[in-house]
Amino acid sequence: MPTPSKAPGVLTRAQRALVEFFRLEAAGGIVLILAAVLALVLVNSPLEGLYHAVVDPVHHWINDGLMAVFFLLVALEIKREALSGQLAGREQLVLPLVCAAAGVLVPALLFTALNHDDASAMRGWAVPTATDIAFALGVLALLGSRVPVGMKLLLSTIAVVDDLIAILIIALFYSQGLSLHALGAAAVALFAMWMLNRRGVKHLAPYLLLGLVLWVCVLKSGVHATLAGVATGLMIPHVDKRNAIDDEVEHSPLETLEHALHPWVAFAIVPLFAFANAGLPLGGMAPAHAFAALPLGIALGLVVGKPIGILGAAFLMRALGWARFPQGVDARAMLGLGMLCGIGFTMSLFIASLAYHDAVRYDEAVLGIFVASVLSALAGLAWLRIVLPARNAG
């Protein structure tokens, strides 16, 4: 018996989830910007002492604790996209995967070209490789109905793959002083979660309790503690061939947790991280500081490297016949998308905090991130306003 068609104008559950995702990400991006601006204002005002009195005691817990929840959400999104979303099929995966990889490689090469003779600066080679999905979608939201859905999907999928690459970079290059005992305990906790998953346990409580144990073990191991959030997220069950969850009737445990975490991450955790890490003192800085090798390498990597890498990869994939641009997206729109991917704010700040423990180097990195993110946002917004036709919002 054929399945009854849905009434016109009625969104499926998947479509409703997509609309909610974009709404939350866009609004969260605006809150993120406001938090960063507030930190800048406070640290460059007579209230600087108050800012540091509030932030310094909790800075470690925000970066190692709350950001583990952020990475938990990232892992949930990656797993959902890989099993049932934009990364589930080869045709859907090729374009964002190759674009994201090129958008990581070209900025890293540009940064290296300017800083290869400075070992201290080179610790931050990965800073300009990241894209801030909340910030980018927040800027894209300012264009309203001009933006085709396919462009939003491609931007968000590139950013998800970008996050996955960033996670691998953090695990491989920013872990130090490993403790085998703590890693062994972490492996036991991870194995226990894997067994729960294989046995079809769908209650979230045991996964989250084991995730907390895993976080403590990873914190003590020398591997950055946020990676415990990634590992936990990948262990949460989702709809696939191995379970009996009806995708049209009920949420999987992964979706339930993702929906619960999304508002907290978008409106609390990421803005708190920005507030705690974006306090850049500008008093002793001159415009020439932005042209020092480290901040210039970050700025060029994000502003120039990201669009070159993404647009070049997209053209190559299309020329080879391996991928097509989304509906409503032409070469000019792809350039604008590449510009917005140069907004590297949250993840770039996070990698900078891992790479540079020296305050001067860190401030140089933050300066480069700020300049790049503002330029990328303004350039992308202006360019897309020109090249995207106005559409009827109705």
Image (spheres, grey):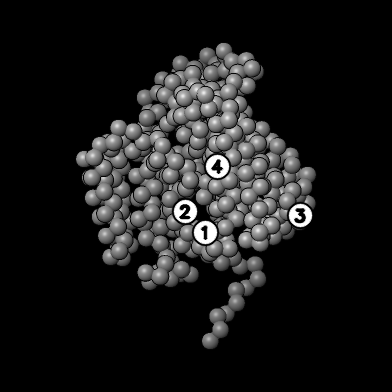
Quarter the C terminus occupies:
bottom right
How far apart in space, not on screen, are marks 4 and 3 (Cα)? 33 Å
**Mark linked to residue 104:** 4
Mark toward the start of the polypeptide (4 vs 1): 1
Decide: few, some or many residues near mark 4? Use Cα within 10 Å; few <14, some 14-19, many ≥20: many
Q: Amino acid at mark 1?
A: Leu
Q: Are marks 2 and 1 in contact (CB under 8 Å)?
A: yes
Decide: few, some or many residues near mark 2? Use Cα within 10 Å; few <14, some 14-19, many ≥20: many
Decide: few, some or many residues near mark 1? Use Cα within 10 Å; few <14, some 14-19, many ≥20: many
**Mark linked to residue 391:** 3
Can residue 343 be seen here?
Answer: no
Mark toward the start of the polypeptide (3 vs 2): 2
Q: Amino acid at mark 2?
A: Ile
Q: Are marks 4 and 1 in contact (CB under 8 Å)?
A: no
Please state which of the two labelled residues, at mark 4 or mark 2, is closer to the viewer: 4
Please state which of the two labelled residues, at mark 4 or mark 3, is closer to the viewer: 4
At a point 37% along the width and 30% down the height, the residue shown is: 60
Q: Quadrant of residue 41?
A: top right
Mark toward the start of the polypeptide (4 vs 3): 4
Relative height, residue 51 to residue 211 (above, below): above
Q: Amino acid at mark 3?
A: Arg
| Tag 2 secondary structure | helix
- The residue sitting at the front extreme is 117
Mark toward the start of the polypeptide (2 vs 1): 2
Q: Position of residue 104 (x, y in %)?
A: 55, 42
How far apart in space, not on screen, are marks 2 and 1 (Cα)? 8 Å
Relative height, residue 250 to residue 186 (above, below): below
Q: Amino acid at mark 4?
A: Val
How far apart in space, not on screen, are marks 4 and 1 (Cα)? 18 Å
Residue ID for mark 2: 78
At a point 25% along the width and 37% down the height, the residue shown is: 179
How far apart in space, not on screen, are marks 3 and 2 (Cα)? 31 Å
